Amino acid sequence: MWLSKSHHPFYRSANFLKRKKSSHESRVPCGRCTELKPHRFQLFLLALGALGLGVFTNAPETAFAQAVPTYERQPAVFDFDQTAGLPPYIFRAYQFAAETRGHFRVEVYIGMVNDILQFVKASSDSDDAGGYRAQYEINVTIWDKKNNLVDSHNWKRELVASSFDATNDRKKFNLERAAFDLPPGEYEIALEITDRDTGKNLRERRPLKLAESDGQQLRFSSVVFTEPFGVRHLLDEANPAPTAAEALAAWKSLPRPARRDSLRYNLTAILTNYARAGNGQPDGVSQSSAGSQSADPHGAIAAGAYFEIYGAAAGETLQLQYEIRDWRQQIEQAWEETLTVTEAPLSHLAVLAEKITQPGLHTFRLVAKSASTKEATAEESFQVQVSASLNYAAPLAENSVLLYEPLRYIVKGAEYKRIAEADAAARDSLLAEFWRQRDPDPVTPANQLREEFYRRVAFSDMRFAAAGKSGAKTPAGWETDRGRIYIKYGPPKEVHHQMAEQGSPPYEIWFYPNLDLYFVFRDKTGSGDYELVNR
């Protein structure tokens, strides 16, 4: 399907606070093309067009697109995380016990990326001269079930970005927080964010149920996923390489309110720095943060899940049972932990980094049992997103299949069949000849076309790996729909994604405005395999 992104309602709502930029302002990096000189780059574009690598063409999805756009210089390294980025904004409400007996403390967190805000050039006589400024106002209101106003917080914020690129940042949230102490009951949280420069706003309302408790039954707070965070300032300076267990013990020595405040909440519940490694250890998580006895000079505590337990008396022993289930609700990991309640309520952080080996949608489930047969359960969903190295040589060396099988996306018929069915020695010769004939600049030692193709293949294989369907072969990253589109068209100029909520599966929309194309992918099963749904 190849419609302009301006026709799609999600695109219009995603940048709800920002005015449309001019075309030269909204360009997003997509390739390694700055390494090529202009006259050689034209040859490179022609060769890519002949192979049907459509990001350099003006044609819809086809095996051999021909049209070539005018030359645009691109940065040497494409940052997919910046293009895909975080969700435009996120809105979470967490429940904890309040200091007032029987009440709840509801903590509302709002995260917004710079890219949805309207930044304007700061005036030359201001303290921020040369930079860009955005202003917004937030109102969070609590209503009861009879639509009576219970409480409200309102505040204004001004942000300053030092450069134009920073105004488009999608890798970091601007965090806002409001807290309410409420008795048990049924409520509704109303959020309104208003851009003070454009007057545009976003409104959202969500139900909030605070269940009454007698104070004796065992129960959990909200489960909060956390980012890795450092506690080096709490550790003995004479210890140059504290273990993860020592770092965790130092964090537990803080008073309970300070413990919670020191955490870095992962509002998206997406773990993004993981990849399957040969030893089962998630890549991107150092052994120092994952292993209980490993040394870490930074005193880092790995990604985990924070929760509090109420209804247990000091001195009581609790048995905690943990499970991580995959998208099919099959148990991937299960472990137990025994805790002695030293304070009431009990706060705890379960480190998850070493427990995760697969991408896709997961459920973290925990059960607490006491000797007096009291029991409580809680569960929360999270996603694991595979990261990928920009060094494409390593995966190609480890898996020779990647050298020829992905060619089926760009080469059809007898030529591909001849390469695929040849023995190893003959295939190497055929591949060498295949790329020699398509070298855009034979004078140089490097074949830029070949490099670009295999960079896309390797990136797709690492980034878009999925957990697979029940009873079926696990698809490689390059075999998925996202992998195929990425290989054929290269990096999208913009990506918008919506996380799973209220029974709706997560989806992504990839925009290629220069081709007048967009592609919608939906993770129908929760396995992390996003299927193309807008054919």
Image (cartoon, rainbow, N blue to C red):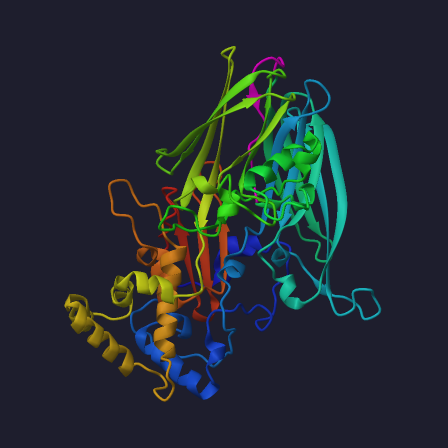
- Out of 293 and 509, give the one closest to the viewer: 293
Q: Is residue 483 left or right of residue 257?
A: left
Instruction: Find the residue positioned furthest to the right.
Output: 125
Q: Is residue 66 visible?
A: no
Q: Is residue 81 magenta?
A: no
Q: Which secondary structure class fits the magenta region best?
A: loop
Q: Is residue 399 left or right of residue 67?
A: left
Q: Is residue 454 left or right of residue 282?
A: left
The quadrant in which residue 224 appears is top right
- Out of 495 and 97, give the one closest to the viewer: 97
Q: Is residue 206 visible?
A: yes
| Residue 296 against residue 71 in the figure, above or below | above
- Residue that appears at 75% across and 41% down: 154
- On the image, the x and y values in percent for residue 90 come to 59, 45
Instruction: Find the residue positioned furthest to the top.
Output: 372
Q: Which residues are magenta?
A: 213-227
- On the image, the x and y values in percent for residue 448 come to 38, 78
Quarter of the figure with the C terminus? bottom left
- Residue that appears at 15% across and 66% down: 421
- On the image, the x and y values in percent for residue 443 come to 36, 89
- Residue that appears at 53% across and 42% down: 303
Q: Is residue 214 magenta?
A: yes
Count of marks placed on residues:
0
The quadrant in which residue 118 appears is bottom right
Instruction: Find the residue positioned furthest to the front.
Output: 238
Quarter of the figure with the N terminus? bottom left
- Out of 308 and 516, give the one closest to the viewer: 308
- On the image, the x and y values in percent for residue 271 come to 49, 46
